[in-house]
Amino acid sequence: MARPVIAIVGRPNVGKSTVFNRIIGDRLAIVEDKPGITRDRLYGTGEWNGKAFSIIDTGGIEIDDDDEIMRSVRVQAELAIEEADVIIFMVDVKAGITHSDDEVAQMLFRSRKPVVLGVNKVDNDNRMNDVYEFYSLGFGEPIALSGSHGIGIGDLLDAATELLPVIEDDDYDEDVIRVALIGRPNVGKSSLVNALLGEDRVIVSNVAGTTRDAIDTPFEHEGQRYVLIDTAGMRKRGKVYESTEKYSVMRAMKAIERADVVLVLINGEEGIIEQDKHIAGYAHEAGKASIFVVNKWDVVEKDDRTMQEFTRNVREQFLFMTYAPIVFLSALTKSRLHKLLPVVNYVSEQHAMRIQTHLLNDIVSDAVAMTPPPSDKGKRLRINYVTQVSTKPPTIVCFVNDPQLMHFSYERYLENKIRAAFNFEGTPVRIYTRRKSEED
Ligand code: GDP
Ligand code: GDP
């Protein structure tokens, strides 16, 4: 469910990204070897003292119009104030309090957001005396850090997570499908929202979501209830925010977290660009059901092969999401729009599907009989037992003699066999390998 957000703010070179990387640790490395997922180190997730959170390194947000540094620091602070529940304000002990530190401090102070002050580059005890100077910024006790030595990170997280609010889960009924629309600016997100809601219909109730600024829009179609997640974010455009790719990604990320089904919009007229892959990658990693919606299909010059060719292109570009169905439509003319919601219903079911253990084991035994696992130094992987431990996304655990022997390629083979038997269309399937305990 929705995680509260921590943002790191401060001048360039105080060590924000160093500390950010310390906080997210090895987590980012996990999926890096999978094709098609490009990482930008702006947004991560973490857990501390049992509290899960998202964390943003605002230093990673490039401001397109290249004004002087102070302007960009100011904009980053604005973003943090708008998006974050807790702000880590970072300064540099070697530099002391600079004019721009003062300016950021005033902005943060006025925002009334909870702020934790981290004084970085305190690499040794000699520097400790200099830390107290930063009391004067007015954010209470400064926390001494050394990002490069990994000192003080625990204290920083203690202080920051202490201030995190508890975010209530959405209280939508189980049968309401939560849909997020994501995609780069101008791809047609707002137009598709309007098309789905019907032009004539006045939206009577905007339900305030759990996140301060998220506005969800409920609607019903053929007896199925839906809610469009964070449609306010789409309306609140303009200014500097939309101009930065990474900001849009951040916005999308928050909507994705709260959704069941993610519509990944692609501009049919312009084709696929790198940014589309970043955005889709987040939906994949978050374990959501996804559909590629190729919009603006009305303006594409077509013959009888165009759709097939576009499909092949999507498959090639999004190798990591071959499970996601593709719907071609026009939000503007509403042509083929009627095809979308049935697919939403379908992938939502697949995302929530639970396979009985004996059926799953039958399929896996057959798969193993057909292609036995490779052996490594004379030792062969033995799969004792397979079970689906959760849904949304379907998550399967394989109990084996030695998890080290499970290779990525064999896991992929099992996934393909499981999909061939049960489909799971539109949803990622997670497979974990665990050692079978000695007793059983
Ligand atoms: P950012 O611009 O605020 O994200 O800062 P970076 O994380 O890129 O760090 C800027 C520079 O400060 C780099 O050269 C880092 O190696 C260095 N740095 C970061 N943390 C520390 C630290 O704890 N001690 C020292 N001495 N240098 C640090
Ligand atoms: P958003 O930034 O993703 O919310 O995109 P908008 O919904 O604001 O659409 C951006 C522009 O694309 C607007 O001028 C729309 O009229 C246009 N547009 C949206 N969907 C379609 C479509 O299906 N066909 C055509 N031709 N134009 C579209």
Image (tube, grey):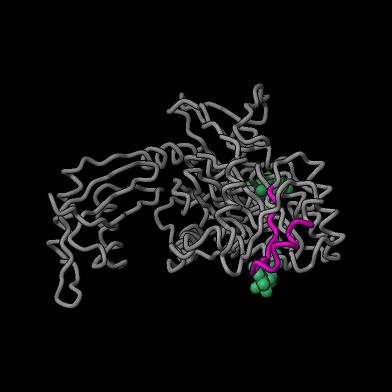
Ligand 1 - quadrant of the structure image? bottom right
Front residue of 5/101: it is: 101
Q: Residue furthest bottom?
A: 377
As rendered, which of 377 and 184 lies closer to the eye?
377
Image spot of residue 286 (x, y percent): 47, 50
In front of the other: 102 or 326? 102
296 lies above or below 233: below
Q: Position of residue 297 (x, y in %)?
A: 59, 52
Q: Check residue 247 for magenta coloring.
A: no
Residue at point 78% right, 41% down?
111
Give the side of residue 409 with respect to residue 283, left or right. Answer: left
Instruction: Measuring from the top left, give residue 81's x and y in whole percent.
Output: 73, 45
Residue 271 visible? The answer is no
All told, the count of numbered labels is 0
Residue 103 seen by the camera? yes
Q: Is residue 128 inside the magenta stretch?
A: yes
Near-viewer residue (184 or 128): 128
Residue extent of the magenta highlight: 116-133
Q: Is residue 163 left or right of residue 137?
A: left
Residue at position x 31%, y 55% from top? 432
Which of the 4 quarters of the picture holds residue 59? bottom right
Give the residue drawn at x 67%, y 66%. Answer: 122
